[in-house]
């Protein structure tokens, strides 16, 4: 679970130009919402998450 989460956290931190330790809950939630919106509007190939 932790390793799987780290993959997402690295991507979020990269996009936020921040260290993983400095990510806030708000930033993480916003990233997942953004990725979900991309998935709905552009399709699964455009989104980061592979669900």
Image (cartoon, rainbow, N blue to C red):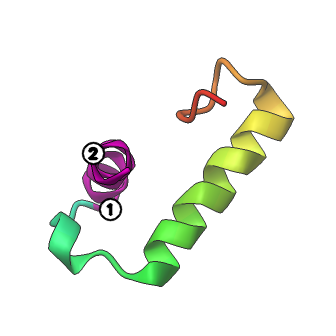
Disc on the earlier residue, 1 or 2:
2
Q: Quadrant of residue 32?
A: bottom right
Q: Is residue 19 left or right of residue 47?
A: left
Please tell me which residue is depicted at 47% across the width and 68% down the height of the picture.
Answer: 28
Please tell me which residue is depicted at 53% across the width and 59% down the height of the picture.
Answer: 31
Residue designated by label 2: 3
Q: Which residues are magenta?
A: 1-16
Magenta-span inclusion, residue 45: no
Q: Main secondary structure of the magenta part?
A: helix
* Image location of residue 13, percent across then percent down: 28, 58
* Image location of residue 25, percent across then percent down: 45, 81
Magenta-span inclusion, residue 3: yes
Q: Is residue 29 left or right of residue 2?
A: right
Q: Between residue 51 and residue 3, name the one nearer to us.
A: 3
* Location of the C terminus (image quadrant): top right
Q: Secondary structure at mark 1?
A: helix
Please tell me which residue is depicted at 15% across the width and 66% down the height of the picture.
Answer: 19
Callout 1: few (<14), some (14-19), or many (20+) C-alpha neighbours within 10 Å? some
Q: Is residue 24 above or below residue 37?
A: below
Q: Is residue 28 left or right of residue 8?
A: right
Q: Which mark is residue 16?
A: 1
Please tell me which residue is depicted at 30% across the width and 54% down the height of the picture.
Answer: 2
């Amino acid at each position: 679970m932790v390793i799987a989460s780290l993959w997402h956290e690295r991507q979020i931190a990269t996009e936020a130009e921040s260290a993983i330790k400095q990510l806030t809950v708000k930033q993480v939630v916003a990233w997942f919402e953004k990725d979900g919106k991309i998935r709905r509007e552009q399709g699964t190939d455009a989104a980061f998450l592979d669900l």
